[in-house]
Image (cartoon, rainbow, N blue to C red):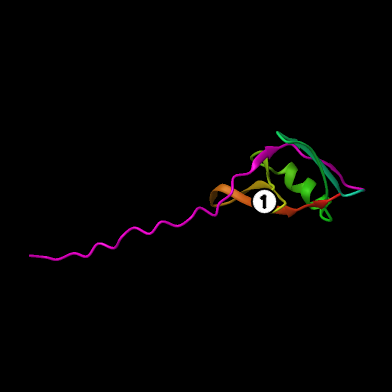
């Protein structure tokens, strides 16, 4: 007779947040980033506006706004990673 030990399943709270798909408009000269969500118009500032536009040009999915952490996530293609690589841009109130 073989005895096996079964450990109880540990449930971890989900820390993953779901983003809101957005289509951002970026003013490179001012660093202004604006977009609409179901809650209305949002205007923010990004010190990395040029990098943000570059990421948007290479995006393979819609941009995601994660309001809980004030971050715009752009997914770009990456060799060897089927889902792509998410680039996060922290936006501050404008």
Taking the spot 29% from the left edge, 63% from the top edge, the residue there is 7
- For the point 68% across and 54% down, the residue is 69
Vertical position of residue 37 compared to residue 50: above or below: above
Indicate the quadrant where residue 21 lies.
top right
Rate crowding at label 1 as few (under 14), some (14 to 19) or many (20 or more) other CA atoms within 10 Å: few
Q: Residue at x 92, y 48 (%)?
A: 29
* Magenta residue check for 17: yes
Tell me the quadrant of the picture where the N terminus can be found. bottom left
Rendering coords of residue 71 (x, y %): 71, 51
Q: Residue at x 34, y 58 (%)?
A: 9
Q: Position of residue 4 (x, y in %)?
A: 18, 64
**Is the magenta region chiefly helix, strand or loop?**
loop
> Which residue occupies the extreme right position in the image?
29
Q: Quadrant of residue 43?
A: top right
In the foreground, 41 or 79? 41
The secondary element bearing badge 1 is classed as loop
Farthest residue toward the left?
Answer: 1
From which residue to which does the magenta span run? 1-29
Residue under pointer 1: 68
Please state the horizontal and vertical placement of residue 66, each as a whole percent of the image: 67, 47
Residue 92 position (above or below residue 62): below
Q: State how many labels appear.
A: 1
Closer-to-camera residue (2/10): 10
Residue 20 in the magenta stretch? The answer is yes
- Image side of residue 7 versus residue 64, left or right: left
């Amino acid at each position: 007779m073989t005895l096996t030990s079964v450990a109880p399943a540990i449930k971890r709270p989900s820390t993953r947040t779901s983003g809101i798909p957005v289509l951002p408009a970026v003013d490179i000269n001012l660093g202004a980033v604006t977009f609409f969500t179901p809650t209305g118009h949002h205007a923010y500032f990004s010190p990395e506006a040029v990098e943000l536009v570059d990421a948007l040009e290479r995006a393979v999915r819609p941009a995601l706004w994660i309001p809980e952490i004030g971050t715009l996530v752009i997914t770009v293609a990456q060799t060897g990673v089927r889902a792509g690589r998410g680039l996060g841009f922290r936006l501050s109130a404008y």
